Amino acid sequence: KRRQDELFFHLTQLEKLAAPTTFTKMSLWTLGQNETFFTEPNNNPIAGILRKELEITPTQGKKILSQRVKIQALCNNIKEVLQLIVD
């Protein structure tokens, strides 16, 4: 029983550490949007607000776009890790 309780405790701690923060969740959500979200911010109010508030330059926008696939893969990895911990 004690060993099982300790294992549960450590898995719970691991789950908390692996879970993305609110900021990370927002970042991952943003990077998961289609390309027009970044290239045509006037068509999406959230995109316009993010670009304005974060002061994203066109050069930075292009770099973000170039990294989207890698970031989406990382997001999938995070989901898989959290699922493995829960199972």
Image (cartoon, rainbow, N blue to C red):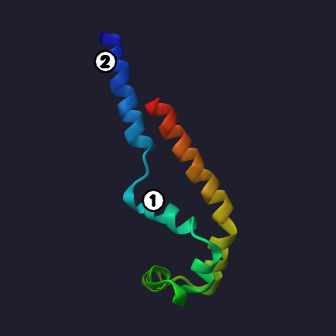
In the figure, 51 relative to 3: above or below? below
Q: Secondary structure at mark 1?
A: helix
Q: Which mark is residue 62?
A: none
Q: Would residue 58 appear left or right of 23 to someone viewing this image?
A: right
- Tell me residue 34's x, y (percent): 62, 72
Q: Which residue is mark 2?
A: 5
Q: Which mark is residue 24?
A: 1
Marks 1 and 2, how far apart at CA:
30 Å
Identify the image quadrant of residue 24.
bottom left
Which amino acid type is marked by label 1? Thr
Q: Would residue 40 appear left or right of 51 to someone viewing this image?
A: right
**What residue is at 55 percent from the left and 41 percent from the top?**
80
Q: Farthest residue toward the bottom?
A: 42
- Tell me residue 44's x, y (percent): 50, 83
* Front-most of residues 52 and 40: 40
**What residue is at 69 percent from the left and 70 percent from the top?**
66
Decide: few, some or many residues near mark 1? Use Cα within 10 Å; few <14, some 14-19, many ≥20: few
Q: Secondary structure at mark 2?
A: helix
Q: Would residue 13 appear left or right of 43 to someone viewing this image?
A: left
- The total number of labels drawn is 2
**What residue is at 57 percent from the left and 69 percent from the top?**
33
Identify the image quadrant of residue 2.
top left
